[in-house]
Image (cartoon, rainbow, N blue to C red):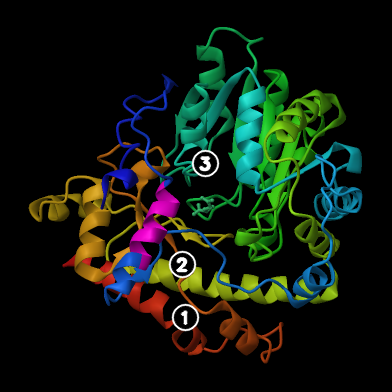
Amino acid sequence: MDASTTRSSQRLDGRFVSLNLNVRGMGPSATLAIKERCRALRAQGRRIYDFGLGQSPFPVPTPVVEALRRAAHEKDYLPVKGLPALREAVAEFHRRKEGVPAQAEHVLISPGSKELMFLLQLVYYGEIILRTPCWVSYLPQAQIIGRRVTLIPTTFEGGWKITPENLMWVLVGANDDGRPRLLVLNYPMNPTGHSYTVDELRDLAEVARRYNLIVLSDEIYGQLHFRSEHVSIARFCPERTIISSGLSKWCGAGGWRLGTFTFPPDLSWLLDAMSAVASETYTSVSAPIQHAAVEAFRCGVEIERYLWQVRRILSALGASCVRTLQEGGARVVPPVGAFYLFPDFSPLADRLARRGVLTGADLAGRLLDETGAAVLPGSDFGRPAEDMTARLSYVDFDGSQALAAGETIPLDQELPPDFLSQHCPNVLEGVQRIASWVAG
Ligand code: GLU
């Protein structure tokens, strides 16, 4: 594993820590670095199981592609905050899907939700609260800007979730109730594939309200909840929740670069500050992409059918990978959404140590070298270096082919037993190789 994928390994050295970070020594983002590495290894003829970057394997739904084709001639700069019809479609999407009172005037469109998170951290003067494991870029973004970050480590036993109790412990420990703080939640979760229950969200919302936190609710995987049961924390504290979404995951359009933030009215000062920065930097998102995104966020029948197929394929594949990893001796929280697993190999730590594997980065490096399976070590997600965890994105398959095959099977039926071996063979084989290697 190269240095760029292990650079965050020193970050966490206590149970709850506050970090003042800086930019020196930063490498490229771990997710993008591993993608490049896989490409290079494949170009050398190596057999690689690419479980690194979290990119949807599925195609962009046909009505959205057609909308983009129709909009190809759109060439004017669009308003900084976004195409009005798109802002309305996004607000309506959240009203319908999450039952929250979103309004078009409070929606901000950008080239990817990653950019919006960066802008938010830039304009918001407070401290950022994150759980670990957390998505790879939250911490480096805070580092670039020089924001103070508080990490809340979570555990396998606790389903890798922040509880109201450990959130409160951090808040009370800070001994300053009025301090401006931004709590970042992400569910279904990257890198663990799990999500919060309605009761857990309600309890977290109560703590957020009591301590006057702003909540950034990263719901980019919301539509990939396998049972279509995603609930937003904005239902319980709408006045302080910013909902983050975009086209990258549920719409299979990561490379289109379109993200959205939906603010409550009281936080429109943040939206205005972010769009001021946007106006001096990227100006606006590509016009054809924004026109096509209107079709996506309207989420018509054909897109809903697509989502049902996508969910049942990911659900079956996730469950199969969990079984294989557990047979190899890993502990894994079964996913309820997205396309990630975060196996914990600590039950095998002694055995691994005898083979010279002492850190998560050692493990990821050896897996890549000796099995061809590319995963990211837990340290890229804010975990300590010695954590025997890794993130596995089970996306290395031809989503178009799997989707076409899924469409021939009625939605109320289970996928046949050989579906995964026919349409996702690389994932099954790669995960089996990981399980055999760690068990060996
Ligand atoms: N969300 C994706 C992942 O965690 C990567 C997207 C990106 O880093 O821009 O792998």
Q: Is residue 27 above or below residue 294?
A: above
Q: Give the residue at mark 2.
A: 394
Sequence-wise first label, 1 or 2? 2
What's the CA distance linking mark 1 and mark 2? 9 Å
Choose between 375 and 39: the one closer to the eye: 39
Q: Residue at x 61, y 28 (%)?
A: 121
Find disc 3 in the rendering and name its residue: 161
**Any mark on residue 28, and which?**
none
- Element at label 3: loop
Residue at image mark 1: 424
> Dot 1, crowdedness within 10 Å: few (<14), some or many (≥20)?
many
Q: Amino acid at mark 2?
A: Tyr
Segment colored magenta: 30-39
Kindly report the distance in space between the C-alpha atoms of the residues bearing marks 3 and 2. 21 Å
Can you see residue 14?
yes
Which of discs 3 and 2 lies nearer the camera? The answer is: 2
Name the spot of residue 310 as percent of width and height, x first: 64, 73
Q: Dot 3, crowdedness within 10 Å: few (<14), some or many (≥20)?
A: many
- The quadrant where residue 13 appears: top left
Which comes sooner in the sequence, label 3 or label 1?
Answer: 3
Q: Residue at x 33, y 47 (%)?
A: 5
Q: Earlier in the sequence, mark 3 or mark 2?
A: 3
Secondary structure at numbered mark 2:
loop
